[in-house]
Amino acid sequence: MDLRKRSARIVLLFFLLFCKAQATVHYYDFVLKEKNFTKLCSTKSILTVNGSFPGPTISARKGDIIYVTVHNDGTYGVTVHWHGVRQPNDPWSDGPENITQCPIPPGSSFTQRVNLVSEEGTLWWHAHSDWTRATVHGAIVIHPPRGASYPFPEPHGQETLIIGEWYKGDVMKIIKDALASGGNPNASDAYTINGQPGDLYACSNGTTHRFSVVPGKTYLIRIINAAMNENHYFGITNHTLTLVGTDAAYIKPFTTPYLLISPGQTMDVLLKANQKPGLYYIAASPFHDGASPYDNTKATAILQYRGSFNTSHHRHRHRHQHPPLVFPDFPDHNDSSAAFNFTKRLRGLGTKSHPINVPKKVNKRIYMTVAVNLLTCNASTCDRTTKLAASLNNVSFQIPSIDILEAYYWNKTGVFTKDFPKEPPSYINFTDPSNNVFTTTGTRVIMLNYNESVEIVWQGTNNTLNTAENHPMHLHGFSFYVVGQGLGIFKNKTHPKSYNLHDPPEVNTVNLPLNGWLAMRFVANNPGVWFMHCHFERHSSWGMDTVLIVKDGKTKETSMLPPPKDMPPCSK
Ligand code: C2O
Ligand code: CU
């Protein structure tokens, strides 16, 4: 290599290093405010960010830092969470109400820092106060860092599709009434794709979301399940999807006619527009394998090939009218094995630039049962003698009235206890429908030492309610590796032998199969207070939650940052 070429290379190398070191800083203003929307033939006022539903997309590159100033122009306190963002050493900006902060009071604001150090792909943000996330959510699109590229050919175009759940009533009232009565919350009235139920619903003609593509080109579609209480099958009629990433981490690509996507999850797929030019349904349809009531409707958007093509839609005068389209084929709504088999196909990408760092050894294992239960209640708190509840290791989590993070940081006692059990109270036949249905309550958290290698095995359960179902389990502050999963009861002698420690997928939300188990691992190297819960909102509201506190390490770099100056006050 001659000298000139070599020095040019060195200059280029420095340029790249310089660019890499320069995190771009972005600023966003999120104004929480009520706005009227008309769907399903009626108009209602919903809480939005900046008046849009879904809310604004945050778009950045891996390594960037985003400051979001959240102004609350609504009528009650709210918080906002950056789902799947690790937020290294900085639980202060994480957002879950009364876990890491008190709500932002009406008329004030809070600036949160979203620090995208390790994620690449798609995440999302959502309100994290009661059921406000139904309408307060949006995408976080994280492109590769400057100078880097996707681990697949650059797509011709990109699209983000958010699956939502629409309630005709006021969501805050729906959960309040359900908790007061002790029964199931009302099911939703429609699902939406990018805010639109699609033309299978009354009064939705003309509003269906459309995504137009050039024949022959490949697109990257980012799908977010922001629904409150339901998993979804997702697919596009006549097209196969190539799944390339989930929860802002790349996976080994595989093709599939449909996705199974749970609330909280994101999936990035490549779509080749390789079918006969025309219109095709993009569709979401619920997967629900439990016995509780649910919204059994379907949402649609339209994939529309550009250019002139000869289908009967040209006979329709109005752009939004089209001939009847065919709905994609999905497994049955309660086909647990279809869901299980789909989840099992995920494998981490594991290349030099996207390595897999799964802990090979663990120093702390927690075996955790996941259950829907009953609690007794009296006439002063609910209309019946028992109320629905949910638990982890037979503890139904009680959210305190001030946040756990500040209580921990300032050594305030009486807010939580550090004694979340590392195993269930007894080793019964967990999936037996004659198991005791009642649970205990508490605000018991898991304490972890800095840098501990942790394994959590979630165990699905059944009891006399006989409402066993899958659960999308989610952890804040970390992505974790899914090392094993199976049906039935976890056996700690044999099942770990079959763990995938070679290329497990790295996720922030995972579907625990119905009456099955799932093992995950992570290193507790992010000091802070991190919420863990089922991402079905009804289960989380009933107490299917706990908190992980990761203690500081010995250095400043391994310790929690101090609180920001504008932390919302805790009034109680
Ligand atoms: Cu999507 Cu507690 O979060
Ligand atoms: Cu659940």
Image (tube, rainbow, N blue to C red):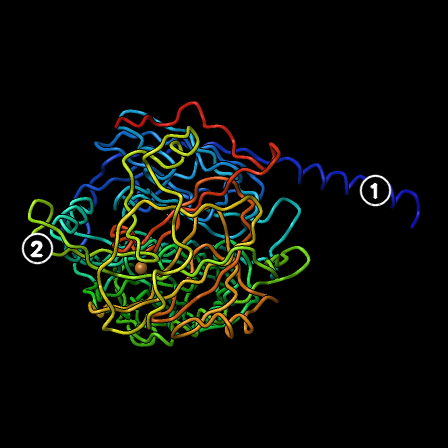
Q: Position of residue 248 (x, y in %)?
A: 51, 53
Judge left or right: residue 90 versus residue 258. Answer: right
Judge left or right: residue 444 versus residue 216. Answer: left
Q: Residues within 10 Å of mark 1 (few under 14, many from 20)?
A: few
Q: Earlier in the sequence, mark 2 or mark 1?
A: 1
- Residue 8 circle label: 1
Q: Are the two marked residues, 2 and 1, in contact with CB atoms closer than 8 angstroms?
A: no
The quadrant of the picture occupied by the C terminus is: top left
Which residue is drawn at the image coordinates 36% and 49% (left, top)?
546
Task: Specify whether residue 153 is in view.
Answer: no
- Residue 147 circle label: none
Q: Is residue 423 above or below residue 179?
A: below
Q: Position of residue 251 (x, y in %)?
A: 55, 63
**Residue type at tag 1:** Ala
Task: Specify whether residue 422 is in view.
Answer: yes
Q: Is residue 512 above or below residue 73?
A: below
Q: Position of residue 385 (x, y in %)?
A: 9, 56
Which residue is drawn at the image coordinates 46% and 54% (left, top)?
508
| Alpha carbons under labels 2 and 1: distance apart | 77 Å
Who is closer to the viewer here, 399 or 68?
399
- For label 2, the SS is loop
Residue, disc 2: 384
Who is closer to the viewer here, 375 or 508?
375
**Residue type at tag 2:** Arg
Judge left or right: residue 103 versus residue 482. Answer: left
Q: Position of residue 343 (x, y in %)?
A: 44, 69
- For label 1, the SS is helix
Quadrant in the picture for residue 387: bottom left
Who is closer to the viewer here, 181 or 34?
181
Judge left or right: residue 159 versus residue 233. Answer: right
